[in-house]
Amino acid sequence: MQVSELRMVPLDKLTHIMCAWKGCDQACEIRNMPKGWVWLLTYWSRKPELLFMKIPARDMSRDTVLCPQHAFMLERQLRETGR
């Protein structure tokens, strides 16, 4: 049996973060994130917030990163948004 625990850790206590892609073991420094790594934030809200700090933590389902390889793989799966 595996047991896991979800804990909120203050950002100033984090030094490294791992790619969220299942099975990937790449990590990077938060304060000096290499080019190509991307933040992945998903949340639910009736009225989307444009300012990150206004998003209630309870509404976030993901706040993590993807390494360059997996950021590319995710982008290939998404519909073009015309940016």
Image: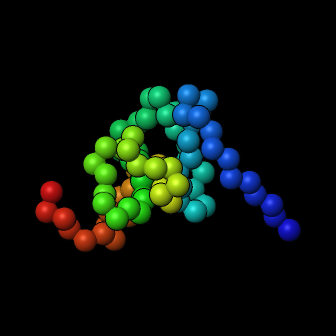
In this view, the residue in front, 1 or 49, is 49
Image x and y of residue 39, in percent = 41, 47
Q: In which quadrant will I find the N terminus?
A: bottom right
Residue 63 visible here: no
Residue 52, position as x, y percentages in the image: 36, 44
- Residue 59 location (% of width, % of height): 47, 57
Q: Nearer the viewer, residue 36 or 41?
A: 41
- Counting from the top left corner in percent of width and height, residue 10 is at 59, 34
The relative height of residue 32 versus residue 53 in the rendered view (above or below) is: above
Residue furthest to the left in view is 82
Q: Residue at 62% x, 39% y: name it.
A: 9
Q: How is the image coloured?
A: rainbow
Q: Is residue 61 left or right of residue 73?
A: right
- What residue lies at 34% left-to-right and 71% top-to-bottom? 77
Taking the image as shown, residue 25 lies to the left or right of residue 78, namely right
Q: Is residue 22 shown left or right of residue 72?
A: right
Rendered view: 37 above or below 21: above
Whether residue 6 is situated above or below residue 29 in the rendered picture: below
Q: Is residue 76 above or below residue 41?
A: below
At 19% from the left edge and 65% from the top edge, which residue is drawn?
81
State the quadrant of the C terminus: bottom left
Total marks shown come to: 0
The answer to whether residue 65 is left or right of residue 1 is left
